[in-house]
Each structure stands twice: as structure tokens, then as C-alpha cells.
Image: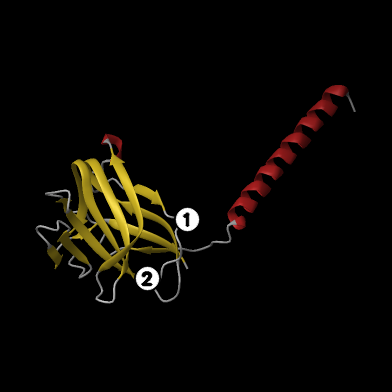
Amino acid sequence: MTPARAGLSSAWAALGLALLGAGCGTTAAVSAGGTTRELVLAYDDSRATGTLAFPSMTYESVLRFSVPEGEHRPLRLRLQAGAEGQLVVTIYATTLLETPGETLRTVTFDISKPDVSDGRDGRWIVADLGEMKPLKGDVWIGVRKAGGEPTLWASSVVSGQAFVRNNDPNNFMGLLPTKRTPMLRLELVP
């Protein structure tokens, strides 16, 4: 075998090993998590028809999610923003009276121009919930503004799971059902 040919053979062998190694690394990364499925909970119909605005810092749009039987580990929370500003999203446990109760996690979204969706472009803002404890039963997700004039896309679906409330102690408004459902997704691992 000539030296040029031996060098070519060595190069092909190195390339083959590199590709084999890359393939094994990908396979190991995919199977290392052990997760092959997830649940995506949503009550809208994936068709944004308008936005929800927040008239004050205490006004909160609340969506109740019924987690399927058993415990499920939260993965991500997705929302579709319609305008710039700051949104605070709170995940609540449910009370005996089936209202938002103890705060389980709070996430703040600083929404800038690149984060804003037109409601049809598939642009979602995502929060990682991987460090949360498993959820079971009903959980509530509340969204309120903390700065600017942010909006949240909503669909015209009357889900029976969407509410608004005012957390101002001087102007307390209990949960009121709404005729529009916010574009929120809660992703869980069974």
C-alpha cells in the first residue's frame, strides 16, 4: 500500500469512528433521560382571536389545569405574548374551595420585541419548570402584569377553566369566568 493510500485509509477510518462516536453520543443523550412521552395541557383551540390586557398590576388572568390521575413532573410552561412588557406567572396549588391557593412557583417574563407573537407565527415564550416538585390534582396558573403594557394572546374558546380576578385588598374581586381562554401550555412528564 502506498503512503498516500495509507493516509487516505486512515482518514476514512478516523471519519468513520467520529461518525460512529457522534451517533452513539446522540443515542445516549436521547435515552439517558428515559422520557419518551409528555403531556401538554391546554384549553384553547390554538387559534388566537384577540389579546387579554391587564388594566392594573393586581388584575390576574387565571387558568385552572386538571392534571391527570397520579403525580406528574412539570417540564415547561409556554405562553404567547401579544405586546411588550413584564408578566408575572404564578403556579398555585388548589384550595379545598377549588380556588388558587399556595404559590408553588413564580416566573417573571421580560417580554421584548423579539418575544412578541402575532398569534399565528408559533412564537412562544418558555419557562423551564424542571426543578418543581411533581403536581397532582388541579393547579392554577395566574398571569398578571408587572410593568409596561403586556398582553397575552387568547382564543375565543369558552373552556370553563379561564377566570379573572383582582388581588387588590381594597377592591377584592373573586374569580369570574371569562369567555376567552389564554394561550398557555403546561407540559408534564407522567
Q: Residue at x 36, y 55 (%)?
A: 77
Residue 178 seen in this snapshot: no
Q: Nearer the viewer, residue 58 or 170?
A: 170
Q: Is the residue marked by circle 1 packed among few (<14), some (14-19), or many (20+) residues within 10 Å?
A: few
Q: Nearer the viewer, mark 2 or mark 1?
A: 1
Q: Secondary structure at mark 2?
A: loop
Residue positioned most to the left: 171
Q: Are marks 2 and 1 in contact (CB under 8 Å)?
A: no
Q: Give the image's coloring scheme.
A: secondary structure
Q: Which disc, if any, is residue 57? A: none
- Disc 2 marks a residue whose amino acid type is Val
**Quarter location, residue 93:** bottom left
Residue 124 position, x and y percent, is 32, 48
Residue 60 position, x and y percent, is 19, 56
- Mark 2 lies on residue: 67
- How many dots with numbers? 2
Residue 169 position, x and y percent, is 14, 58
Label 2 and label 1: CA atoms lie apart by 18 Å
Q: Secondary structure at mark 1?
A: loop
- Disc 1 marks a residue whose amino acid type is Glu
Residue 61 position, x and y percent, is 20, 58
Residue positioned most to the right: 1
Image vertical order of residue 101 relative to residue 58, above or below:
below
Q: Nearer the viewer, residue 168 or 38?
A: 168
Q: Residue at x 70, y 43 (%)?
A: 21
Q: Is the residue marked by circle 2 packed among few (<14), some (14-19), or many (20+) residues within 10 Å?
A: some
Q: Residue at x 37, y 48 (%)?
A: 126
Left or right of 187 on screen, residue 44: left
Check the picture and name the quadrant holding the N terminus: top right
- Mark 1 lies on residue: 131
Q: Residue at x 21, y 41 (%)?
A: 147
